């Protein structure tokens, strides 16, 4: 059987599944190798607000982000199906003149927040907010409809992927599999609570305390965060940290203080100084395409990176 069109995508987070969708819909025969089901991937834990934040290289990341924004705007027309909604909120400690002309041109209604909306300096914006369990399920189903196959299997070496083209979307796993010591974890802890009526999101950064506090309203819950614990591999929620997260969020929205806690989540962001998105011809004639190191901006750049990775896989 001719296998020239066969591709194995290793990794089933938002980067892996989005890349697999683009490849499968271009006519390739694609298998996704997932170390665990998508609902247990790091992406499933993400707060999942679209915003090009702390990702390098900046110029490329902005282009990838804007491509992704166009897709999310379309998907937001079917929120129950895709998990994508356009939601208004405040990006704290941000100013219009810091964003560059792209922001005002591409984000209608972007403006300085008012004192009633936010106590500090901020931007009022309408941005894509993703319900990640729903979105990952939708991506998987779209991939399967395009003829793709998902195989749950543990990969200990990328050489196991016997296909003409292998796309490495392993996130934090790339540290061990490539191996690439430049990939490191930045731990994020979240608290999930009943939503007491919050309809807008807030991201607030306290440079002095070194904390970023955020709250994201989802259809059936409110997601509170968060932490940025560098080089911390622990996946166990810390009760003291959870209490502090709720306390910080309640400063922003007092009604959160009495909200019933539904659960706790921890994820490890795959941070790298720059995203690695490149092709690596292998000695045996196969092609390895790397697409990892997106940190906490995976959903923000997913479609732009997926399209570039698919292009690299077809040359």
Image (tube, grey):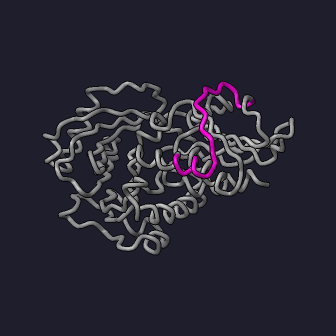
Quarter of the image that includes the C terminus: bottom right
Taking 191 as reference, is 204 above or below it?
Answer: below
Looking at the image, residue 59 sits to the left or right of residue 243; the answer is: right
Quarter of the image that includes the N terminus: top right
User: Is 115 in the magenta?
Assistant: no
Residue range corresponding to the magenta coloring = 141-159
Q: Residue furthest right?
A: 284
The image quadrant that residue 12 belongs to is: top right
Looking at the image, residue 297 sits to the left or right of residue 174; the answer is: left
Residue at 39% in and 73% down = 108
Residue at 61% in and 34% down = 151
Q: Position of residue 135 (x, y in %)?
A: 44, 49
Looking at the image, residue 221 sits to the left or right of residue 98; the answer is: left
Residue at 45% in and 69% down = 103
Q: Position of residue 314 (x, y in %)?
A: 76, 54
Taking 301 as reference, is 213 above or below it?
Answer: above
Q: Position of residue 275 (x, y in %)?
A: 61, 47
Q: Position of residue 152 (x, y in %)?
A: 58, 31
Taking 233 as reference, is 143 above or below it?
Answer: below
User: Is 157 in the magenta?
Assistant: yes
The total number of labels drawn is: 0
127 vs 10, nearest the viewer:
10
């Amino acid at each position: 059987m001719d296998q020239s069109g066969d591709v194995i995508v290793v990794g089933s987070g938002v980067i892996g599944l989005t890349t697999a969708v683009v490849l499968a819909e271009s006519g390739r025969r694609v298998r996704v190798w997932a170390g665990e089901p998508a609902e247990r991937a790091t992406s499933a834990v993400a707060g999942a607000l679209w915003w090009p934040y702390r990702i390098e290289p900046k110029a490329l990341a902005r282009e990838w982000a804007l491509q992704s924004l166009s897709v999310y705007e379309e998907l937001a027309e079917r929120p129950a199906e895709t998990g994508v909604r356009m939601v208004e909120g405040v990006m704290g400690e941000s100013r219009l003149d810091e964003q560059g002309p792209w922001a005002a041109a591409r984000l209608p209604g972007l403006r300085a927040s008012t004192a009633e909306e936010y106590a500090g300096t901020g931007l009022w914006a309408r941005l894509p907010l993703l319900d990640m369990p729903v979105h990952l399920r939708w991506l998987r189903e779209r991939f399967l409809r395009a003829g793709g196959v998902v195989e749950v299997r543990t990969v200990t070496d990328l050489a196991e992927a016997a296909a003409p083209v292998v796309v490495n979307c392993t996130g934090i796993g790339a540290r061990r599999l490539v191996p690439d010591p430049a990939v490191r974890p930045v731990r994020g802890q979240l608290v999930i609570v009943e939503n007491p009526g919050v309809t807008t999101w807030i991201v607030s950064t306290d440079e002095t305390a070194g904390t970023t506090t955020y709250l994201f309203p989802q259809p059936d819950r409110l997601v509170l965060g968060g932490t940025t614990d560098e080089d911390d591999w622990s996946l166990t929620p810390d009760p003291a940290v959870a209490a502090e997260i709720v306390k910080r969020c309640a400063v922003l929205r007092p009604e959160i203080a009495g909200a019933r806690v539904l659960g706790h989540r921890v994820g490890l962001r795959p941070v790298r100084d720059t995203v690695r998105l490149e092709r690596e011809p292998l000695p045996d004639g196969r092609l390895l395409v790397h697409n990892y190191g997106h940190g906490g901006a995976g959903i923000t750049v997913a479609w732009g990176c997926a399209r570039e990775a698919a292009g690299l896989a077809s040359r």
